[in-house]
Image (cartoon, rainbow, N blue to C red):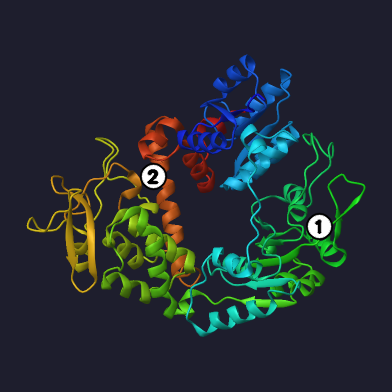
């Protein structure tokens, strides 16, 4: 049997490499195009069974590629790859004849599912000849494979006890709490401890898609239900049959869809988009939100009857600042998780870092802590993390300022670090008399915190050793000038910081665009960010190209 040919169209090399390796390992024959014009040339001269097409590309967008391909009679299924902020583009693509869409970022399983749906009954030869056996786990094994729930605080112990009590029941569960508190971890724990543990756990982010796409995502659609619906598509509820469906950010769901969700909860059946026959499902429903649903009901944004239907069992997860005793155990867990790939023989962090972690408010909760530890493992310089904590949790590099000069070059001078202390010396290069391992790496004994291996070779100077100010090629590493103070009493300190960062970022981008005569691709290269990231920043900051505004 001939291998199924898939064309991947994306201007980012890393994305093309990832998709090629993943699909190639599954038995597909993969070819890649780095631009729209190259993709059209390959489509006209070759035969492909499916196309993975990115929407945002320079010179020619994915939508234009799709339009030209369909206008020339191209019939291969086209799967649109769209970022969350590009959901409107995904809707337009479906109306223009795209077979399906995939929201970035996506996982391996999601990619395999959407490609399999587009191809219908066809599957790669490797999958057809050697299907993976279905492994049925015991409740204990499934619980062990679930994401780890680490906590010693009384509030989280009560939450875990409640999970154990209701796991084997089929009642809906409402998870409440701020973003990053671990609601998905609790949802997976409920599924792993239930009798449905050997069945699918399907997650849907209700805030990631607009209403028309979310309805098709949840309930599926029939062939011909709308333009581009070339084949029937089962929804997430059908995929979660006999298992658990986790609806994250339920407070973002449109009122019209809330009514349809209420019908599913009451009758355990629904109609696909464009369908005439009802579909029965048996899915355990777990939902989560960071909103106050009672306030949303008062504002008319959430149905009261749906709220009471979901609020059979409510589990409220406290923010990390209210359970500081969990900070150190969580830090140790994430250090073990990410240290294996980036650091060697490090079991503990310097005491200065742990003390700063314990005192910090963690507005992003456990998710922010995880990212902070991961950043520390990658950069191997605690002073950068300490600077971020002392600046209120906002990464200095993400708050750009205007360059000191746009006339002479693209380099910028940041201020010297305020935290060159014992923690910096722990991660800095050791003295010349330190013992050397066989791999050419010096071993440094940390004072009172155990031993570690520094990443710097003996013969080379580590970039993390410098104490004096350095020059950066990236304008986003420049120090942030203080913005004009907002009216007193109207904004919180956190809001002022966000506003200042946005204004500084906008001015830096504007200055570079003016310098490059509004050549966005060239400006992105000089700013050391991707072309797509610059487009998103321009849209987010409300920057308007004066050439476009001058056209009548």
Q: Is residue 509 left or right of residue 77?
A: left
Q: Residue furthest top?
A: 45
Q: Nearer the viewer, mark 2 or mark 1?
A: 1
Q: Which of the 4 image quarters holds residue 431? A: bottom left
Vertical arrangement, residue 234 with respect to residue 49, above or below:
below
Rendered residue at 66%/52% (across/down) = 134
Q: Tell me the number on the disc at residue 344.
A: none
Badge 1 local density, few (<14 within 10 Å), some, or many (20+)?
Answer: few
**Lower position in the chain sequence, tag 2 or tag 1:** 1
- Is residue 292 among the parts visible in the rendering? no
Vertical arrangement, residue 451 with respect to residue 278, above or below:
below
SS under mark 2: helix
Q: Residue furthest bottom?
A: 154
Q: Is residue 209 left or right of residue 517?
A: right
Image position, residue 300 (x, y; %): 76, 67
Q: Residue furthest left?
A: 433
Vertical arrangement, residue 62 with respect to residue 368, above or below:
above
Vertical arrangement, residue 85 with respect to residue 325, above or below:
above
Q: Which of the 4 image quarters holds residue 233? A: top right
The residue that mark 2 highlights is 508
Badge 2 local density, few (<14 within 10 Å), some, or many (20+)?
Answer: some
Front residue of this view, candidates 149 and 125 = 125
Q: Is residue 67 left or right of residue 466?
A: right
Image position, residue 267 (x, y; %): 88, 64
Image position, residue 76 (x, y; %): 70, 26
SS under mark 1: helix
The residue that mark 1 highlights is 256
- Is residue 151 among the parts visible in the rendering? yes
Image position, residue 471 (x, y; %): 23, 45
Check the picture and name the quadrant holding the C terminus: top right
Q: CA distance from mark 2 to mark 1?
A: 42 Å
Rendered residue at 60%/65% (across/down) = 142
């Amino acid at each position: 049997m001939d291998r199924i040919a898939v064309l991947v169209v994306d201007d980012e090399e890393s994305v093309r490499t990832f998709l090629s390796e993943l699909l190639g390992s599954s038995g597909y024959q993969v070819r890649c195009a780095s631009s729209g014009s190259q993709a059209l040339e390959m489509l006209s001269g070759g035969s492909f069974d499916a196309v993975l097409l990115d929407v945002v590309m320079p010179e020619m967008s994915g939508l234009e590629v799709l339009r030209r391909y369909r206008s020339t009679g191209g019939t291969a299924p086209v799967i649109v790859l769209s970022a969350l902020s590009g959901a409107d583009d995904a809707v337009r693509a479906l109306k223009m004849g795209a077979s399906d869409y995939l929201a970035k970022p996506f996982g391996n399983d999601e990619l395999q599912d959407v490609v399999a749906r587009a191809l219908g009954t066809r599957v790669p030869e490797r999958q057809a000849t050697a299907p993976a056996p279905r492994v049925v786990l015991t409740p204990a094994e499934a619980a062990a494979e679930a994401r780890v729930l680490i906590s010693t605080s009384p509030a989280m112990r009560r939450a875990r006890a409640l999970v154990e009590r209701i796991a084997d029941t089929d009642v809906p569960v409402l998870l409440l709490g701020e973003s990053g508190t671990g609601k998905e971890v609790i949802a997976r724990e409920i599924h792993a401890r239930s009798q449905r543990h050997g069945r699918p756990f399907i997650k849907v982010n209700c805030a990631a898609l607009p209403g028309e796409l979310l309805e098709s995502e949840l309930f599926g659609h029939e062939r011909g239900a709308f333009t581009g619906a070339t084949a029937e598509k089962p929804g997430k509820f059908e995929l979660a049959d006999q298992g658990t469906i986790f609806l994250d950010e339920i407070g973002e769901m449109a009122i019209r869809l809330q009514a349809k969700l209420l019908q599913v909860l009451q009758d355990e059946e629904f109609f696909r988009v464009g369908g005439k026959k009802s579909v029965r499902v048996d899915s355990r429903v777990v939902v989560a939100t960071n909103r106050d649903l009672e306030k949303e009901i008062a504002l008319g944004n959430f149905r009261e009857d749906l709220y009471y239907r979901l609020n059979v069992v409510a589990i409220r997860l406290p923010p990390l600042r209210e359970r500081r005793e969990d900070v150190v155990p969580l830090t140790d867990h994430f250090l073990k998780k990410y240290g294996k790939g980036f650091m060697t023989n490090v079991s503990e962090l310097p005491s200065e870092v742990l003390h700063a972690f314990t005192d910090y408010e963690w507005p992003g909760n456990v998710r922010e802590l995880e990212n902070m530890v991961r950043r520390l493992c990658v950069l191997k310089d605690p002073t950068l993390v300490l600077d971020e904590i002392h600046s209120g949790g906002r990464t200095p590099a993400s708050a750009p300022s205007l360059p000191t000069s746009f006339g002479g070059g693209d380099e910028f001078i940041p201020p010297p670090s305020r935290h060159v202390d014992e923690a910096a010396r722990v991660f800095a290069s050791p003295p010349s008399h330190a013992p050397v391992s066989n791999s050419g790496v010096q071993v440094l004994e940390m004072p009172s915190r155990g031993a570690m291996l520094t990443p710097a070779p003996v013969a080379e100077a580590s970039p993390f050793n410098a104490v004096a100010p350095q020059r950066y090629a990236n304008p986003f590493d420049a120090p942030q000038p203080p913005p004009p103070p907002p009216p007193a009493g109207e904004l919180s300190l956190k809001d002022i910081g966000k506003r200042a960062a946005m204004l500084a970022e906008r001015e830096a981008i504007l200055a570079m665009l003016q310098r490059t005569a509004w050549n966005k691709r060239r400006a992105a290269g000089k700013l050391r960010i991707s072309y797509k990231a610059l487009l998103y920043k321009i849209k987010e900051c409300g920057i308007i190209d004066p050439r476009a505004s001058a056209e009548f």
